[in-house]
Image (tube, coloured by chain):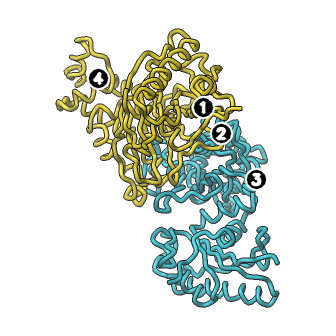
Chain colours: A yellow, B cyan
Amino acid sequence: MEEFAIGIDLGGTNLKGGIVSETGEVLNYSVTSSGNDEGPQRIRACLMNMAARLVALASDNGVKMVGIGVATPGIIDTRFGGLTGGAENLPGWKNTPFMRLLHEQFHLPVHAHNDVSATVLGEFHHGAGVGRRHVVMVSFGTGVGGGIVIDGRFYGGASGYAGEIGHLVTSAFGQVCACGIRGCWEEFASIRGIVRTARRYLGEPGGAKSLINRWLGDGGELGPQIVYEAARLRDETALRIVDEVGCNAAIGIGSLINIFNPELVIVGGGVASTGPLFLDTLTRHLPDWTLKDSLEAASIVPARLGYRAGIIGAATLVFEGINRYASP
Amino acid sequence: MEEFAIGIDLGGTNLKGGIVSETGEVLNYSVTSSGNDEGPQRIRACLMNMAARLVALASDNGVKMVGIGVATPGIIDTRFGGLTGGAENLPGWKNTPFMRLLHEQFHLPVHAHNDVSATVLGEFHHGAGVGRRHVVMVSFGTGVGGGIVIDGRFYGGASGYAGEIGHLVTSAFGQVCACGIRGCWEEFASIRGIVRTARRYLGEPGGAKSLINRWLGDGGELGPQIVYEAARLRDETALRIVDEVGCNAAIGIGSLINIFNPELVIVGGGVASTGPLFLDTLTRHLPDWTLKDSLEAASIVPARLGYRAGIIGAATLVFEGINRYASP
């Protein structure tokens, strides 16, 4: 009989959940507010409600439920049943032993992991990484996150902090990053970096005529969506922005390939989901920043799971036995 | 009865060898020319002579010899019994199946690995890394090399090219590296980088009075030795060079700590062996380039094995069963 797990993906704004099969199919997907605006008590209530609803649905449908997986910002402590740190975007959440609470209420094994790590595990087991052993995943969004799979296993480092690939220093004499380090890759290749690059090109003499400026005048918001849309329509300024963004993305991916010699690089996140132009431009710039032999060994592919990646990754924690709450 | 292996370390200039115990002690150490000036036939003869001498010594002394390990530049192919690539400093060496030749002549298991990888394995098993699981080693010399130990195992990547940490891009708009990539860490933190930094400071108005300039006038060669010696004597220009070099070294080590979250970083190579000043300066700059939690989790220590690292590492390949020649 096929086994199922509940996958829950907690973000700063949304709480997503679903019942996930061993093969990565998502049933009964739903999304609600994470309750973050109203503090940790409210997040906790939203999480318990989501779990209760999914457990009841699973029971009604007679599926074999083997556990609950949660993807959350921060670093997990499986003894405490909550976080040891991180999750700055969810104030107060650090002190809630949500794994213990879920375990006590539903009497199921509870697993949890950092959201980015869970996404990588989801893509590795059920998305673009199926069948590979050495994988680097890079997610371009508000920040630049990602993770590393080494010989089939997610790499967490000595204390769970590994994979902070957005904080590769790629331009030691450049912009200071939000983390305080000067020249982090993230400052160039995240949405912040794209917006900064766009402002610079739009401020140049040719920039005034750009479609982007016209759309901004009509109330559009400066970000990857509008830039990549204008580039698809061959707007000259947009094409220059897209080219520089692709170069900035390639600089860090090249370094990661030089260090890890992966067989596969999975590119995801909100920026990548604007369409194939991002990946195409990045791939075109890669040879400038990568050692030849290592580049030849690596395929660069888009992420496949999209908005469901966190849920599928959370369920994967259950199926793969990763980070189980150590009930006393 | 204690077991021994022959460890041989082949470099562009020297061939080093010794009989190494399971606990990493080196007996009968010797160093000769690698024969590289006279081509691959001569390297082969030097290697076979070295092995023959050590096998005979071991036999005379009645020690239990379990295999021969060789550290060489390049990427090993254990089926061919030689290299698949790399080793640009040893022209023609790529086509010599030295593992097969050693096996046929001495009837012992033969293991080989890239010289940098072997050094890392040596330090990990018998030097500064003993008892650790997650280690990054960085070697500052002609280039910047190193390697990564993940959960106790050397990480080679999908096709053996991993660990090219010198080709992290740390300054995307800086100096082009010898590899062709712009802004590689190696261009800033290797001996080339030190010499370039020194020239710049020595060319400034205050530089003329520097001890370094006096010593260069007396026939000294501009390099780490002379710079660190002058800095020890509190020469002002030398201290400024040393500070910038320490910063450049810290930029890349910080990125590696952010990505790998290692418990230990081992710092070695010719530059590090000039004395404690290099490591001290580098450590002082690290907080500027490293995420706080990951930095707190990492100890930064000097390499311990020095010139014997390659030999001990080569023997470690035998004891650990790594990269054994697959005799048909």
Expressed as whole percent of the image width and height from the top left, the position of residue A319 reads: 50, 42
Per the model, the C-alpha gap separating discs 4 and 1 is: 40 Å
Where is mark 2, residue-wise? A159
- Of labels 2 and 1, earlier in sequence is 1
What kind of element bears circle 3? loop
The residue under the point 57% across, 89% down is B104
Examine the rendered structure and indicate whether residue B310 appears above or below residue A72.
Answer: below
In-image side of A224 versus B65 (left or right): left
Q: In the displayed structure, does residue A219 sit left or right of residue B98?
A: left
Q: Nearer the viewer, residue A171 or B104?
A: B104
Chain designation of label 3: B
The quarter of the image holding the C terminus of chain A is: top right
The amino acid beneath tag 3 is Gly
Q: Which mark is residue A75?
A: 1
The answer to whether marks 2 and 4 mark residues whose Cβ atoms lie closer than 8 Å is no
Q: Secondary structure at mark 1?
A: strand
* Residue denoted by label 3: B275
Residue labelled with disc 4:
A202
Residues indicated by labels 2 and 3 sit on the same polypeptide chain: no
Q: Give the letter of the chain under mark 4.
A: A
- Amino acid under disc 4: Leu
Task: Say how many tags the image has.
Answer: 4
> Are the residues tagged 3 and 4 within 8 Å (C-beta)?
no
At a point 53% along the width and 19% down the height, the residue shown is: A48
Q: Are marks 4 and 1 on the same chain?
A: yes
Q: Farthest residue in the left direction?
A: A233
Q: What is the x, y in percent for residue A52?
A: 50, 21
* B250 or A266: nearer the viewer: A266
Label 2 vs label 4, nearer the camera: 2
Residue A15 picture quarter: top left
- Label 2 neighbourhood size at 10 Å, few (<14), some (14-19), many (20+)? some
